[in-house]
Image (cartoon, rainbow, N blue to C red):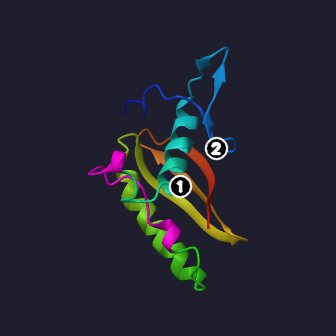
C-alpha cells in the first residue's frame, strides 16, 4: 500500500493560535504533525459556522455537548462524529482508542488515527467550553 500522504502542510501552533514562522518563512509539518493538526482543526471548528467551510462538511458539533451531564452520552456522540468526519481525509483509514473527558471548561480528547498505510498517530487535543 502507498504511504499515507496529506501533502505539504504549514505547521500551526494551537497554543499561540498562529502558524509557525522561522526567519519570516512558514515551517512545514511532518505527516504525523499534519494529521494531528487536521484532527485538531476538525474538533475545534464549529460545523456550519464559517462560510469558508460551506459545503465541505468540515467541523463538528462538539461545542454543543460540553455542558451535558451524561459523560457517556457525550463521549459516544463525539466519537461517532469524529469517526464520520475523518472519512473526509483521504490519508486516514479509521480511529481507535478514543477517549474524551471533561477537565473544567475543556473537553480533552485523545485517540489514535490509523492511516491508510496502517501507520498510527496518537492525537491529543482539547475543546474549550
At x 59%, y 78%, the residue is 67
Magenta stretch containing residue 35, yes or no? no
Identify the mark nearer the N-term, 1 or 2: 2
Q: Nearer the viewer, residue 13 or 87?
A: 13
Look at the picture and state if 91 lies above or below 29. Answer: below
* Magenta residues (range): 51-64
Q: Residues under labels 1 and 2: Cα distance?
A: 10 Å
**Residue at the outermost bottom position:** 70
- Name, please, the residue furthest toward the top: 23
Residue 19 as seen in the image, left or right of residue 61 = right
Rendering coords of residue 44 (x, y %): 53, 55
Rendering quarter of residue 80: bottom left
Residue closest to the far left:
55
Residue 58, percent from left and from top:
37, 52
Check residue 14 in the rendering and tell me which mark sits there, or answer none: 2
Residue at (35, 52) in percent of width and height: 87
Residue at screen point 37% across, 60% down: 84
Residue that label 1 marks? 44
Label drawn at residue 59 = none
Whether label 1 touches label 2, CB < 8 Å: yes
Q: Position of residue 34 (x, y in %)?
A: 52, 36
Q: Secondary structure at mark 1?
A: helix
Residue 127: image location, x then y, percent: 60, 60
Q: Which image quadrant: the N terminus?
A: top left
Q: SS for tag 2?
A: loop
User: How many numbered discs sit on the rendered protein?
Assistant: 2
Vertical arrangement, residue 96 with respect to residue 22, above or below:
below
Amino acid at each position: 500500500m502507498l504511504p499515507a500522504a496529506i501533502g505539504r502542510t504549514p505547521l500551526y501552533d494551537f497554543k499561540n493560535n498562529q502558524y509557525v514562522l522561522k526567519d519570516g518563512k512558514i515551517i512545514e509539518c511532518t505527516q504525523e504533525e499534519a494529521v494531528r493538526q487536521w484532527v485538531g482543526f476538525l474538533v475545534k471548528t464549529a460545523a456550519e459556522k464559517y462560510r469558508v467551510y460551506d459545503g465541505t462538511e468540515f467541523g463538528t458539533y462538539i461545542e454543543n455537548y460540553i455542558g451535558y451531564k451524561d459523560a457517556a452520552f457525550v463521549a459516544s456522540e463525539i466519537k461517532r462524529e469524529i469517526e464520520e468526519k475523518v472519512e473526509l481525509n483521504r490519508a486516514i483509514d479509521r480511529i481507535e482508542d478514543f477517549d474524551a473527558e471533561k477537565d473544567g471548561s475543556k473537553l480533552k480528547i485523545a485517540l489514535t488515527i490509523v492511516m491508510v498505510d496502517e501507520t498510527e498517530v496518537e492525537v491529543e487535543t482539547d475543546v474549550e467550553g
